[in-house]
């Protein structure tokens, strides 16, 4: 995992480190066998069995497995550091984009690394629907592995903490703020990207991940997750610009920093090059 930026807060009371992240999951066959009391259930059939179960208990309204039944197979991130901006305020400086661990790491190792970074650095987290999916999955799966992260609960105060819904000092969920916390319709990240004119999905959808995992395509899953992180970062920059937290100059420098990073990494990480190419295409 990329070495995180320094922890702590800056003079404005904000977290110095920012971690924009996304996860990819597949149905957990072991949990499915226990839930359905079917030890003969094959790994490749677990997803369909879980979807059938949840479709049945919801009267056909929703077959999506609930959070505890999702096994984490990738956690990707963009680490940034808050720096004072020349014109006042602050600007986000990109340190790197990547995925936790290696393709060979199991779920427990990924979760240990993620919560270890939280404990050590206490960053501001930035997600898209993280409050509704990513964070519940991560916490529940960590408990399934008997992991511990007391810092999650001791950081901040009663009103400003990782679980606070209406304060973003420790967690900015873009799906929440862009829908006025559910007052307006919630859009998919790909829909917001299309509306904002930034790259969204590049040929892979979330629904493809299960098949990719069964085919052993972990590297491709991690690459897909990293491009989703890039999209989330671009949307976050628009939000910070709109709120006035980041001025025009700082915003332009942050976008330029991301472009430069993608260009530098394009040769060894083709998915980042493809993201940059799509971005340039959209701006022609």
Image (cartoon, rainbow, N blue to C red):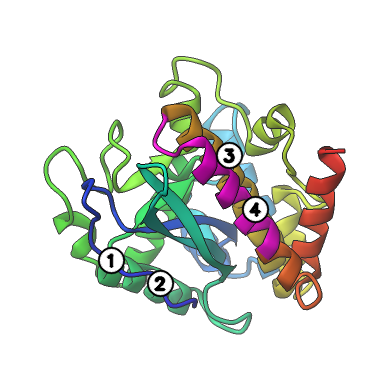
Q: Which residue is depicted at the point 40% across and 72% down?
A: 4
Q: Is residue 99 left or right of residue 158?
A: right
Mark 3 vs mark 4: in front: 4
Residue on which the image places disc 3 = 235
Of marks 1 and 3, which one's residue comes earlier in the chain?
A: 1
Q: Which residue is depicted at the point 44% across and 15% down?
A: 183
Residue 147: give x, y in percent of width and height.
Answer: 29, 72
In the image, the segment drawn in magenta is 244-260
- Density class for disc 2 (Cα within 10 Å; few <14, some 14-19, many ≥20) is many
Tell me if residue 64 is in the magenta stretch.
Answer: no
Mark 2 vs mark 4: in front: 4
Q: Kindly indicate whether the residue at mark 4 contacts the one at mark 2 (C-beta within 8 angstroms).
A: no
In three-dimensional space, the C-alpha distance between marks 2 and 1, rounded to whole angstroms, equals: 8 Å
Residue on which the image places disc 2 = 4
Residue 46 visible within the image: no
Residue 48: give x, y in percent of width and height.
Answer: 69, 51
Q: Kindly indicate whether the residue at mark 1 contacts the one at mark 2 (C-beta within 8 angstroms).
A: yes
Residue on which the image places disc 4 = 256
Of marks 2 and 4, which one's residue comes earlier in the chain?
A: 2
Q: Is residue 24 above or below residue 186?
A: below
Of marks 3 and 2, which one's residue comes earlier in the chain?
A: 2
């Amino acid at each position: 995992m990329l070495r995180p930026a320094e922890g702590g807060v800056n003079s404005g009371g904000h977290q110095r480190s920012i971690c924009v992240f996304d996860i990819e999951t597949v149905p957990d066959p072991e949990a499915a066998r226990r839930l359905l009391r079917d030890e003969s259930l094959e790994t490749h059939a677990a997803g369909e069995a879980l979807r059938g179960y949840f479709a049945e208990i919801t009267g056909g309204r929703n077959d999506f497995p609930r959070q505890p039944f999702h096994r984490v197979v990738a956690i990707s991130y963009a680490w940034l550091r808050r720096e004072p901006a020349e014109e006042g305020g602050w600007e986000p400086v990109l340190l790197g984009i990547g995925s936790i661990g290696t393709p060979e790491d199991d779920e427990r190792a990924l979760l240990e690394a993620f919560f270890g970074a939280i404990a050590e650095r206490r960053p501001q987290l930035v997600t898209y629907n993280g409050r509704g999916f990513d964070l519940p999955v991560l916490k529940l799966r960590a408990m399934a592995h008997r992991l511990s992260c007391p810092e999650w609960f001791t950081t901040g105060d009663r009103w400003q903490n990782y679980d606070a819904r209406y304060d973003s000092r420790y967690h900015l969920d873009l799906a929440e703020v862009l829908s006025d916390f559910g007052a307006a319709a919630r859009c998919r990240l790909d829909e917001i990207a299309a509306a904002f004119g930034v790259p969204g999905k590049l040929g892979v959808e979330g629904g493809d991940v299960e098949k990719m995992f069964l085919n052993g395509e972990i590297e491709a899953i991690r690459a897909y997750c990293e491009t989703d992180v890039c999209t989330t970062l671009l949307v976050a920059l628009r939000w910070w610009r709109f709120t006035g937290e980041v001025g025009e100059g700082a915003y332009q420098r942050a976008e330029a920093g991301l472009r430069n990073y993608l260009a530098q990494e394009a040769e060894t990480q083709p998915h980042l090059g493809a993201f940059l190419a799509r971005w340039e295409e959209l701006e022609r």
